[in-house]
Amino acid sequence: MSTATTIDIGTEEVLARRDGALGRITLNRPRAINALTLEMVRAIETALDGFLADDAVRAVLLDGAGERGFCAGGDIVGLRDSALGDGSAARAFWAEEYHLNARIARFAKPVVAVMDGIVMGGGIGLAGHAAHRLATERLVSAMPEVGIGFAPDVGGTWLLSRPAGELGTHLALTGERLGARDAVAAGLADRVVAAAAVEALIADLAAGTAPEAAIDRAAAVPVEIPDGRPPADLAWIDAAYAHDEVEAILADLDARPEEGAAKAATALRRGSPTSLKVTLRALRDARALPDLESALEREYRISTAFLDHPDFVEGIRAQVVDKDRSPTWTPPRLADVGPAAVARFLAPADPDLELPRA
């Protein structure tokens, strides 16, 4: 029987409790697939403060309430509303969210993230930087920002630029959804565990079992996992996305015989031309950055710049508000997005985000 002690962190949209040696943080907006708000970000920070100070807590676990998923991302309708105003609420949200992403990555106690069901955008920002990133067989993950006139953030450019090859570039430019095996291949998860094994994992962690040993035991539970991407797909992806210009990538995809390449080309043509070019530049630049914090600081510049670009408001309108799936991008063609337009998204913000380093 659980002996968990609930901790008051000021909101019911995030639940925090200590169970033996485990501090547990559960996102609790199941009707919204646990989409993040600024209040939730602050509540997670408060919970982490408490667990850091509590010597009895040896590990922290992140999970989500409900059956649909861990976290569908940030509350993008709220961000759109802010963009239609003065943008201050969106800037505050991103600044504190990115601080939280960096803190999770460097937290002094091991953080275990359970990526079950839908995990996108801001959900990847929470789980993707944890010390132990566990994908269940039900995982559906994506960074779909180019489809809403935005660009991957929450450290997404850092994560997707780390693995060898170009799978991360493909995922960022198409917004393709992927399952557990591909999430591991793309550097978004570390291990696959059965959803049915999670409760036993939590009990092990609460009993003080080291996370590595507890995860090994959970991963040993048999589970049927959907197949990942075949090696042949990785070959054409690596070739097609090796270019440093979106137009060249698209031309390469168009020339290929693989069905997957044709689907990827179609996906690129649906995305915001500005988002596609900014995203590719950010991914290429991220490969040379020294740390996650540097990537988050650059992403903050990009995110705040999108507040002043019409594609952000229009993309969310088309995908989430009116749901007509027919955005009108400005400008509508890749050829109309030149180097100067892309460079504007990398200019310093006012003020810039400055994250502490360990």
Image: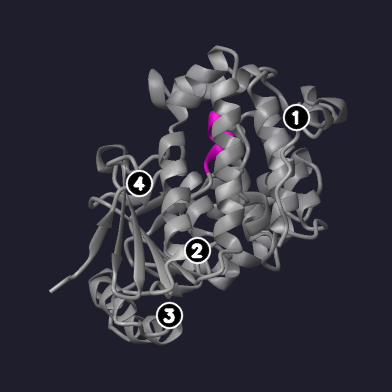
> Is residue 205 something one can see in this rendering?
yes
Q: Earlier in the sequence, mark 1 or mark 2?
A: 2
> Is residue 270 something one can see in this rendering?
no
Q: Mark 1 = which residue?
A: 351
Q: Mark 4 = which residue?
A: 9
Residue placed most toward the observer, 321 or 170: 321
Q: Are marks 2 and 4 in contact (CB under 8 Å)?
A: no
Question: Which image quarter is the C terminus in?
Answer: bottom right
Q: Earlier in the sequence, mark 3 or mark 2?
A: 2
Q: Are marks 3 and 2 in contact (CB under 8 Å)?
A: no
Which region is colored magenta? 144-149
Q: Residue furthest top?
A: 85
Q: Mark 2 = which residue?
A: 183
**Where's residue 131, x and y in %?**
53, 70
Above or below, 89 against 166 in this view is: above
Question: Would you say residue 145 sits in the magenta stretch?
Answer: yes
Most frequent secondary structure within the magenta stretch: helix
Q: Residues within 10 Å of mark 1 (few under 14, many from 20)?
A: few
Disc 1 marks a residue whose amino acid type is Pro
Residue 211: give its label.
3
Residue placed most toward the observer, 179 or 123: 123
